[in-house]
Image (cartoon, rainbow, N blue to C red):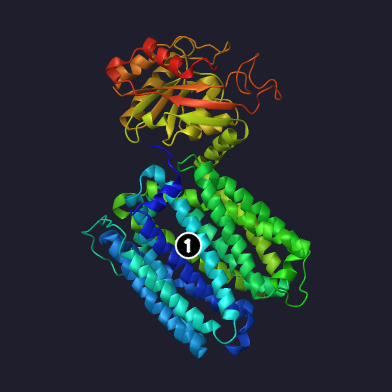
Amino acid sequence: MSETSQFQLLRERRFAPFFGVQFLGALNDNLFKQALVILLAYQTASFTSMSTDVLQNVAQGLFVLPFFLFSATAGQLADKYEKSRLISITVLIELGVMALGAAGFFLRSMELLLVALFLGGVQSALFGPVKYAILPQQLKEHELVGGNALVGTGTSIAILVGLMLGGWLVSEPGWGITAVAAGTFGISATGLLLSCFIPPAPPADPGLRINWNLITETWRNFRFMRRNRTVFLSVLGISWFWFFGAMFVTQFPNLSKNVLGGNEQVVTALLVVFSVGIGIGSLLCERLSGHKVEIGLVPFGSIGITLFGIDLYFALGQQGPHGTAGLGAFLSEAGNWRVLADLLLIGVFGGFYIVPLNALIQIRSDASHRSRVIAGNNILNALFMVAAALLAILLFQLGFTIPQLLLATALLNAGVAIYIYTLVPEFLMRFLVWLLIHTVYRLDKSGLEHIPEVGPAVIVCNHVSLVDALIIAAACRRPIRFVMHHRIYRIPVLNFIFRTGRAIPVASAKEDPELLERAFDEVARALDAGDVVCIFPEGRITDTGEMYPFRRGISRIVERTPVAVVPMALRGLWGSLFSRKPGRAMTLLLRPGIFPAISLVAGAPVPAGLVRPEGLQAQVLALRGDRL
């Protein structure tokens, strides 16, 4: 559980070749698609008489339709067969698709280009389940956020380079189309070579019998997802993000041409800024999450997406086409920088939103059918993206402008976010915990590797403030069930967090002996289920800064369920906002040290047979040191 940099993975064979293959695949997809959409936006008349607004969304729909048609089969193949070989096969398919696309460019055949676009979607549908199912096999759990962040960032950079190359090459008279054809073919060949170095990833279910019936297998994938409510709703959240992204990105060519008055270079700039934003957000995710799957970033991301999506509408309302300007002229107008800033920040918050959801699905899905869960995710993603294309076409027919379409999408995002967080309050609870740690305190942590990665354990810690449980929950990778005094448990707002985190309220034998016995029973059930339980053996929050004697409840717990006990100490909270210095907590909002640097330190586990309250208190005191 050591916290090494996510970039260290790029030096290791278990990740680097796979990263290269997916990077080149994303680069190739976007080079081809950007070349095609630029042609559709600016040279439509030489291909077809169809409206450019409609044609852009038809092309988007054709690319995502295969995810619905073939993802169910792709998920089965990824669970049944060795994954590195499947990756090589999918890259070989990509090579053939790019050859067909080259023919379409040379012959100026809209039919061939759209067929190649559809087949490119088929190849991506086959690659999707393998791409995300191989990560949990090759990476450790605490590396998954970093691995997903690198994949997300690499994809964003690949999109950026692909968009720039595609937009630039297709605009060059004479040799540009030839360069697009040769470039896409060469990138596919390089990816095929690199795929040979991916380490084998054993099949999850080699005895699986392939069900070729699209309808029944798709329904079965949905049943796999629905077994875990959090996974299913996370899939819905991811699918909504793809709806949102498709609705935005598909409009960029005509947004540039008809609203901003920009040429092909401006289209590329919009896409590049958006992609860079997602890459930045993805990389920041690992740092902001503390190297763990922090779903509290998901509400943070959705809030930012909505706010800057709304601001984009008002920024676009100040713009108007003035001919077809190049990138230099576009950047010379101050108002356009606000448009670019909004797109960048939508991308950044999009990274905060999508990376934890992808990692959560990988961790909480059963390994035996993880690929099929991811395939079901891809099917829903496709449905949402096709729905985005259909909705955009409908709204254009109803007279919506592009800025109005983007505003409606941002407002819908707020409604969808509220709905999902109502169904799964765990997301909102983790957001409130994350917000506390990143706004009120500056947290440093050490020794947390002593908390076992799997299996039951009890944590004991000194009790300094009203938010001790929140700080520990935010710092530790594993979910923790806290035993806390019933009065603290019932504090407004905090009660929502504690209930959602399945905290266990307790009272003294004098106050409520029945509640005390129920608490001990619930602790035993939690430990029997393999959970981590944290108690504050002092039984009260300090009002002097010094520790009170540890009570004997910890001995009773380990006598009933013998598990290791991890001593832990909080430092630096005494005198902060939620502590009881100089009196009641939260009485002096502007007291000195409102943004203190605090620490959480854990020591080596104590075997159940050696647990004594006095010994544990001495260890916690030693971990705390002189810093109260």
For the residue pair 118 and 93, the one nearer the viewer reads as 93
* Quadrant (top left/top right/bottom left/bottom right) for the N terminus: top left
Q: Residues within 10 Å of mark 1 (few under 14, many from 20)?
A: many
The answer to whether any part of residue 467 appears in the image is: yes
Give the residue displayed 72% in from the left and 69% down from the top: 328
Q: Where residue 497 sits in the image (x, y, percent)?
A: 53, 33
**Closer to the camera, 469 or 445?**
445
Residue 7 lies, with reference to residue 461, above or below; the image says below
- Where residue 415 sits: x, y (%)? 61, 52
Residue 260 image point, x, y percent: 72, 70
Q: Residue furthest left?
A: 207
- Which type of secondary structure does the marked residue at label 1 adopt? helix
Q: Amino acid at mark 1?
A: Asn
The quadrant in which residue 533 appears is top left
Q: Is residue 95 left or right of residue 444?
A: left
Image coordinates of residue 205 in percent, x first then y, are 25, 56
Using the rendered image of the protein, determine whether residue 424 is visible from the camera's viewpoint.
no
Q: Is residue 539 above or below residue 593?
A: above
Residue picked out by circle 1: 381
- Location of the C terminus by quadrant is top right
Residue at image point 57% right, 80% down? 170
Residue 287 or residue 69, whichever sits in front: 287
Does 204 sit above or below residue 256?
above
